[in-house]
Amino acid sequence: MYMIVVGGGRLGYYLLKALLNEGHEVLVLEKDKSICKTITDELGSVCFRGDGCEAATLAEVGAGRADMLVAVTGDDEDNLVACQVAKHKYNVPRTVARIRNPQHADFFRKLGVDVTVSATDIILEAIEREVPTHPVTELMTVEEKGLVLVDVRITADSPNIGKALRDLNFPKDSKLALIIPHEGTAQVPGPATILAPGDQIIAVTGEESVDALKDTLRG
Amino acid sequence: MKVIIMGCGRVGARLAASLDEAGHEVTVLDSDTYSFRRLPSSFGGTALFGNGMDTEALKKAGIDECDIFVAVTQGDNRNVMACQIAKHLFNVPRVLSRIYDPLREEMYQALELETISPTKI
């Protein structure tokens, strides 16, 4: 795969190294002369000096045949524009942007960025997984289908403990996929499965039903 | 009309002052309060500290009722991003941005943004 990385900062540098190790064809676009020199001295001619937001630069590095463009500069606006130029002018199939402001995620996706990555959100998710006050963790989103994979924990104070699943009113578009009990291994839940404290439930649900599913499970 | 101007530089301040004089409701946004010194003492609009790419700052500036959004900061990409936020997220009827680089301007026009390039004028 041919991948273009915009921004040769620390993130771009380590990304470049990892991708090269995996055997991909990678090129970093970086405006700063000294950063370019450092990368070239260390890793060979895999750094091109230029502005990745400019159509001319992208033309020069053959963006037309790139499989992916990853914009990881420190500025959201630069990452957005680099992805937009790549997508709209050079039809790069996959664009990835790093974002600093997590609120930009939806907006970026609307405007032609396929994937957004926010360090704030990733750290928040890690915290949510560790802290029991967050009973529902969103594990994954299947955007095309409007589905979310969630992890719900049943706490000891839930009124549903001891109840069978068939007695609970689940939202129509929610399916329980797995129950990981406090002790023992994971099981596929059936209508007769009884909820116990410490149960961890992995479920697939429509985006709008996340709260309803949580309420049903936790009472 | 309600106008929001992002960037209180020489162009932004001048534009804000003349629109205010013409009787429009003007709000100027800048991420450096020192820039507001450029506004004349007679300026009757609002000068607001904030980043024009931040949806909360834009809401505070009243973007929900805004008729025109103008981005005139030093950064072409910043202007373009703010304009796209105004256009696609807040459905502002008219958005304008200044783009220094005429090569980029072409690209932004393809994205249906109204741009002015002083380089070409």
Image: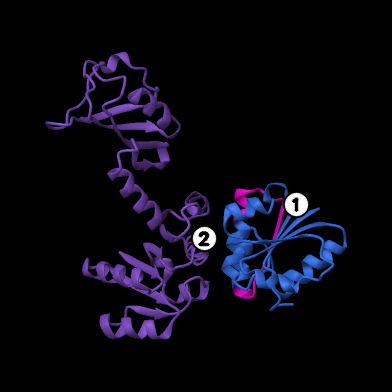
Residue bearing the label numbered 2: A88
Amino acid type, residue under disc 1 in the picture: Asp
Badge 2: residue crowd in 10 Å (few <14, some 14–19, many ≥20): some
Instruction: State which chain is coloured purple.
Output: A
Chain where mark 2 sits: A
Q: Quadrant of residue A5?
A: bottom left
Q: Which residue is mark 1?
A: B67
Q: Quadrant of residue A70?
A: bottom left
> Distance from label 1 to label 2 (Cα)?
28 Å
Seen from the viewer's position, the closer of residues A72 and B63 is B63
Coordinates of residue A152 in the picture (x, y in percent): 30, 33
What residue sits 68% from the left and 72% below the top? Answer: B35
- The image position of residue B29, as x and y in percent, is 67, 62
Asked if residue B114 lies left or right of residue A86, the reply is right
Q: Which residues are magenta?
A: B85-103
Q: Nearer the viewer, residue B22 or A218?
A: A218
Q: Position of residue A31 (x, y in %)?
A: 45, 79
Name the quarter where the N terminus of chain A is drawn: bottom left
B111 vs A193, nearest the viewer: A193
What colouring method underlies this structural image?
A: by chain
A159 vs B111: above or below: above
* Left or right of residue B87, residue A48 in this image: left
Give the total number of marks visible in the rendering: 2
Q: Residue at x 60, y 74 (%)?
A: B103
Classed neighbour count for the residue bearing mark 1: other residues with Cα under 10 Å, few (<14), some (14–19), many (≥20): some
Q: Amino acid at mark 2?
A: His
- Quick one: which residue is furthest to the right in this view? B22
Give the letter of the chain under mark 1. B
In the image, which lettered chain appears blue? B
